[in-house]
Image (cartoon, rainbow, N blue to C red):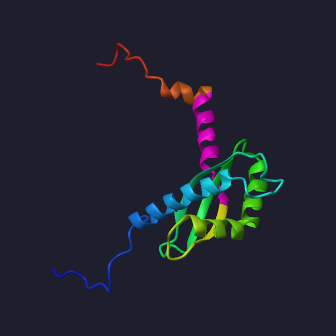
Amino acid sequence: MKRPITSGRQAPAGPSQRQLRAGELMRHALVEILRAQEITDPDIAGVSITLTEVRMSPDLRNATVFVEPLGGGEHAAVVVKALNRHHKFLRGRLGHAVDMKFTPALKFLHDETFDAAARMSRLFDDPRVAQDLKPRPASEDED
Protein backbone atom coordinates (compact mmCIF):
# COMPACT_ATOMS: atom_id res chain seq x y z
CA MET A 1 0.00 0.00 0.00
CA LYS A 2 1.36 3.40 -0.95
CA ARG A 3 1.67 6.28 1.45
CA PRO A 4 -0.68 9.18 0.83
CA ILE A 5 1.04 12.15 -0.74
CA THR A 6 1.07 15.17 1.55
CA SER A 7 1.84 18.70 0.56
CA GLY A 8 4.36 19.24 3.35
CA ARG A 9 5.32 18.35 6.84
CA GLN A 10 2.74 18.15 9.58
CA ALA A 11 2.66 20.89 12.17
CA PRO A 12 4.30 19.91 15.47
CA ALA A 13 2.01 19.06 18.36
CA GLY A 14 3.50 21.64 20.71
CA PRO A 15 5.82 24.63 20.70
CA SER A 16 9.20 24.24 19.06
CA GLN A 17 12.50 24.41 20.92
CA ARG A 18 13.03 27.84 19.39
CA GLN A 19 9.69 29.10 20.77
CA LEU A 20 10.42 27.68 24.21
CA ARG A 21 13.92 29.16 24.30
CA ALA A 22 12.70 32.59 23.13
CA GLY A 23 9.86 32.49 25.66
CA GLU A 24 12.26 31.85 28.54
CA LEU A 25 14.55 34.62 27.29
CA MET A 26 11.57 37.01 27.25
CA ARG A 27 10.43 35.91 30.69
CA HIS A 28 13.83 36.49 32.28
CA ALA A 29 14.20 39.90 30.59
CA LEU A 30 10.68 41.00 31.66
CA VAL A 31 11.40 39.94 35.25
CA GLU A 32 14.46 42.19 35.28
CA ILE A 33 12.51 45.08 33.73
CA LEU A 34 9.70 44.78 36.30
CA ARG A 35 12.24 44.38 39.11
CA ALA A 36 13.72 47.78 38.21
CA GLN A 37 10.25 49.27 39.00
CA GLU A 38 10.32 51.76 36.15
CA ILE A 39 6.53 51.76 35.76
CA THR A 40 4.88 54.38 37.96
CA ASP A 41 1.36 53.01 37.92
CA PRO A 42 -0.53 52.91 41.24
CA ASP A 43 -2.16 49.60 40.24
CA ILE A 44 1.27 47.95 39.98
CA ALA A 45 3.20 49.88 42.65
CA GLY A 46 4.17 47.67 45.56
CA VAL A 47 2.68 44.52 44.00
CA SER A 48 4.84 41.45 43.68
CA ILE A 49 4.16 39.96 40.24
CA THR A 50 5.17 36.46 39.21
CA LEU A 51 5.70 35.87 35.49
CA THR A 52 4.92 32.18 35.21
CA GLU A 53 5.25 31.61 31.46
CA VAL A 54 5.76 33.38 28.16
CA ARG A 55 4.29 31.66 25.11
CA MET A 56 5.69 32.76 21.79
CA SER A 57 3.89 32.57 18.45
CA PRO A 58 5.60 30.40 15.80
CA ASP A 59 6.97 33.49 14.02
CA LEU A 60 8.19 34.93 17.38
CA ARG A 61 6.39 38.24 16.75
CA ASN A 62 3.76 37.85 19.49
CA ALA A 63 4.20 36.86 23.11
CA THR A 64 1.52 35.95 25.62
CA VAL A 65 2.78 36.57 29.14
CA PHE A 66 1.03 34.73 31.98
CA VAL A 67 1.20 36.60 35.29
CA GLU A 68 0.10 35.95 38.85
CA PRO A 69 0.20 38.85 41.33
CA LEU A 70 0.83 38.02 44.96
CA GLY A 71 -2.57 37.63 46.53
CA GLY A 72 -4.36 36.86 43.26
CA GLY A 73 -8.15 37.16 43.41
CA GLU A 74 -9.90 40.19 41.94
CA HIS A 75 -6.67 42.17 42.31
CA ALA A 76 -5.23 40.04 39.49
CA ALA A 77 -7.57 41.56 36.92
CA VAL A 78 -6.47 45.08 37.89
CA VAL A 79 -2.78 44.16 37.62
CA VAL A 80 -3.24 42.44 34.25
CA LYS A 81 -5.13 45.44 32.91
CA ALA A 82 -2.36 47.78 34.12
CA LEU A 83 0.34 45.64 32.50
CA ASN A 84 -1.59 45.62 29.23
CA ARG A 85 -1.83 49.43 29.43
CA HIS A 86 1.98 49.62 29.63
CA HIS A 87 2.72 46.95 27.01
CA LYS A 88 4.35 49.44 24.63
CA PHE A 89 6.71 50.73 27.30
CA LEU A 90 7.62 47.17 28.32
CA ARG A 91 8.13 46.18 24.69
CA GLY A 92 10.51 49.12 24.22
CA ARG A 93 12.55 48.11 27.27
CA LEU A 94 12.48 44.51 26.10
CA GLY A 95 13.93 45.53 22.73
CA HIS A 96 16.99 46.92 24.51
CA ALA A 97 17.31 43.89 26.81
CA VAL A 98 17.20 41.04 24.28
CA ASP A 99 18.96 40.53 20.99
CA MET A 100 16.30 39.34 18.58
CA LYS A 101 15.41 40.31 15.03
CA PHE A 102 11.94 41.48 16.13
CA THR A 103 10.73 42.47 19.56
CA PRO A 104 7.44 40.65 20.09
CA ALA A 105 4.15 42.36 20.82
CA LEU A 106 3.16 41.64 24.41
CA LYS A 107 -0.20 40.51 25.73
CA PHE A 108 -0.63 39.86 29.45
CA LEU A 109 -3.07 37.28 30.83
CA HIS A 110 -3.83 36.06 34.34
CA ASP A 111 -2.42 32.59 34.96
CA GLU A 112 -5.31 30.38 36.04
CA THR A 113 -3.15 27.37 36.99
CA PHE A 114 -2.72 28.55 40.59
CA ASP A 115 -6.49 28.79 41.03
CA ALA A 116 -6.95 25.35 39.48
CA ALA A 117 -4.30 23.86 41.79
CA ALA A 118 -5.99 25.41 44.84
CA ARG A 119 -9.35 24.04 43.71
CA MET A 120 -7.85 20.56 43.28
CA SER A 121 -6.28 20.77 46.73
CA ARG A 122 -9.67 21.69 48.24
CA LEU A 123 -11.23 18.72 46.43
CA PHE A 124 -8.64 16.31 47.84
CA ASP A 125 -9.28 17.70 51.34
CA ASP A 126 -13.03 17.00 51.03
CA PRO A 127 -13.91 14.08 53.37
CA ARG A 128 -15.99 12.37 50.66
CA VAL A 129 -13.01 12.33 48.31
CA ALA A 130 -10.48 11.49 51.06
CA GLN A 131 -12.33 8.27 51.87
CA ASP A 132 -11.81 7.10 48.29
CA LEU A 133 -8.11 7.84 48.47
CA LYS A 134 -7.48 5.61 51.48
CA PRO A 135 -6.69 1.95 50.70
CA ARG A 136 -9.47 -0.42 51.67
CA PRO A 137 -8.61 -3.29 53.99
CA ALA A 138 -8.81 -6.67 52.35
CA SER A 139 -11.86 -8.51 53.64
CA GLU A 140 -11.44 -12.09 54.79
CA ASP A 141 -14.32 -13.52 52.74
CA GLU A 142 -12.66 -12.58 49.43
CA ASP A 143 -10.47 -15.47 48.38
Residue 61 forms part of the magenta stretch: no
Marks counted in the figure total 0
Residue 5 horizontal side relative to residue 27, left or right: left
Q: Residue at x 39, y 63 (%)?
A: 17
Location of the N terminus by quadrant is bottom left
Q: Nearer the viewer, residue 29 or 18?
A: 29
Q: Nearer the viewer, residue 83 or 36?
A: 36
Picture quarter containing residue 34?
bottom right
User: Against 100, is 36 above or below?
Assistant: above
Q: Residue at x 74, y 51 (%)?
A: 76
Residue 124 forms part of the magenta stretch: yes
Predominant secondary structure, magenta span: helix
Residue at the extreme top of the image, as rendered: 140
Q: Residue at x 57, y 73 (%)?
A: 103
Residue 115 horizontal side relative to residue 54, left or right: right
Picture quarter containing residue 126?
top right
Coordinates of residue 10 in the picture (x, y in percent):
35, 76
The magenta region covers: 109-126
Picture quarter containing residue 28?
bottom right
Coordinates of residue 6 in the picture (x, y in percent):
30, 84
Coordinates of residue 132 in the picture (x, y in percent):
51, 28
Q: Residue at x 25, y 83 (%)?
A: 4
